[in-house]
Amino acid sequence: MKLNERSVAHYATCDSPPDKTGFLFKKGERNTAYHRRWFVLKGNMLFYFEERDSREPIGVIVLEGCTVELCESVEEFAFAIKFDCTKARVYKLAAENQAAMESWVKALSRASFDYMRLVVKELERQLEEIQDAAGAGGQQSRPKLSRRNQVVRSRSGASSSSSSSSLSSSSSAPSMAAVYSAQKSLQDEVQLISGSSRENGVAWSKPPSASANGSAEAAPSRAPPVPPRRLGASLESPVSPDTACFSKLHDWYGREVEELRAQWLQSQ
């Protein structure tokens, strides 16, 4: 496998959130002593830096086709990353305590795509079992639901037929309430016209009349009447006679405008 060093270094130091970070002791390939390194796990790639604030990683381990298991070593809490190939390198690491070792072993064991593929297959199998169980339960419950729907439909059909028959009978017969309300409104209008006075085309109620008991009967509230028109008043314009009608007044002003326009054109 060939990797672009710049791309790998950028991926190791970019802002993407890592899956796990921490210090581990790594055994050297030539120098067999353990050196403390800063490790960053992103996906299936395990980067290690010389220091925590280093700008670029000094190495990377691609966690594909490998197993993570405990190993015997001088350092306590040691574990190894082994690959299937016979000539592949074995990476020996050591944590600072038991909890850190267990956490790193679990995280590294679940980092490969092979593990993710197994998890996806298992989830798909569980989903199929749930769907099969739901389908079997639905088929058993369908007859009951259909019978219940038939009962509901028969009841709704009977109620709809009865309601339609009642509506047809009620529509064929004349509505006495409508006739009575129409007669009542007509009588009220006749009483209102007969019991009111008119002036200038506006009707108003008569003042309340005293009853035999001496109490005044309340009359319906009406708007105050328009004051009567004076006998000598005229709607004609004082400037132009015979302009009581609006059309005559409009024609008179039109002729005046034409005369003024002719005078202005002559002056120009």
Image (cartoon, rainbow, N blue to C red):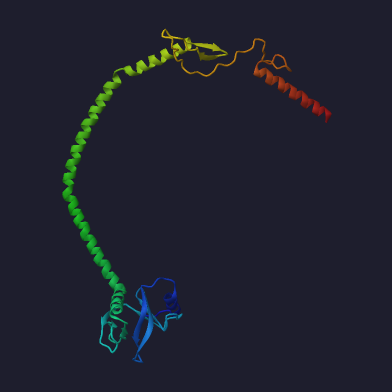
Residue 35 lies, in percent from the top left, at 37, 87
Residue farthest front in this picture? 214
Image-based side of 185 in relation to 225, left or right: left
Q: What residue do we see at 28% from left, 21% from top?
A: 170
Q: What residue do we see at 67% from left, 10% from top?
A: 232
Residue farthest bottom in this picture? 31
In which quadrant will I find the C terminus?
A: top right
Whether 22 is drawn above or below 147: the answer is below
Q: What residue do we see at 25% from left, 28% from top?
A: 163
Residue 106 lies, in percent from the top left, at 28, 75
Whether 235 is drawn above or below 65: the answer is above
Residue 186 lies, in percent from the top left, at 42, 14
Whether 77 is drawn above or below 30: the answer is above
Q: Nearer the viewer, residue 85 or 21?
A: 21
Q: What residue do we see at 26% from left, 81% from top?
A: 69
Image-based side of 229 in relation to 88, left or right: right
Residue farthest top in this picture? 212
Q: How many marks on residues?
A: 0
